Amino acid sequence: DGDIEYWNSYGISKNTLRLFKVYPISHYWLNGNKFTCRVPTYAYNLNGKFKLYAPTRDKFRFMTSTSHIQGIDLLPQRHDTLIIQKSYKDVMLMYEFGFPSIAPQSELNVLSDKVCSDLSNRFNNIYIFYDYDDAGKIGSECLSSLISKSIPLFIKDSSAKDCTDYCRM
């Protein structure tokens, strides 16, 4: 119940968590060693690779060994709008609002030319919705140079750093 309450507070439903293959976990294995989760932790199944998310941790909130683009497997073949986010949580929230969305592993990860070309061909409008901080501005500028028809979006003048925080507020 606490897990569902956490995700619902950001506007993300149980059905969306199922679709995006997000699961609460109690333990995980790393290099053959078993670790117990001492705080709420979630596993994102990204095309058979996993990213772990422990939202209440100050350090090591994320652990991953994949560069898989989050949400790319759930994109429609064509759509008017695509939103490139900074996190999988933001991707899921955009899905709740009916907008296809993806997220690289971080705002500073660069999408390949092949991926940029594919996205440009499939979507009429591409928005880059990163945090309004140095990493977000640099990442957005870099990605905008690779996808010519993209438009950067930021939440300014708010204590919310991203769309899920804004929704929660």
Image: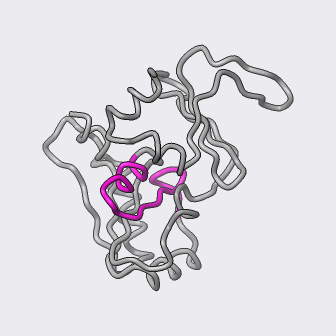
Residue 21, given in percent of the width and then of the height, sits at 58, 46
Identify the residue at horizontal 45%, vertical 48% (top origin): 87
31 vs 126, left or right, is right
Where does residue 76 sit, x and y in percent of width and height? 48, 72
Residue 147 position, x and y percent, is: 41, 77
- Quarter of the picture containing the C terminus is top left
In-image side of 129 versus 18 (left or right): left
Dividing the picture into quadrants, the one containing residue 115 is bottom right
Nearer the observer, 111 or 39: 39
Question: Who's the residue at 63% across and 51% down the image?
Answer: 46
Residue that protrudes farthest toward the left in the picture: 157
Q: Residue at x 36, y 34 (%)?
A: 8
* Quadrant hosting residue 82: bottom left
Residue at the far top: name it. Answer: 38
Span highlighted in magenta in the image: 90-110
Q: Is residue 8 magenta?
A: no
Is 51 situated above or below 9? below
- The residue drawn where x is 34% and y is 82% is 124
Residue 158, percent across and down? 16, 40
Q: Nearer the viewer, residue 110 or 55?
A: 55
User: Is 97 contained in the magenta span?
Assistant: yes
Can you say whether 32 is above or below 15 in the image?
above
Work out whether 32 lies above or below 101: above
Residue furthest right in the image:
32
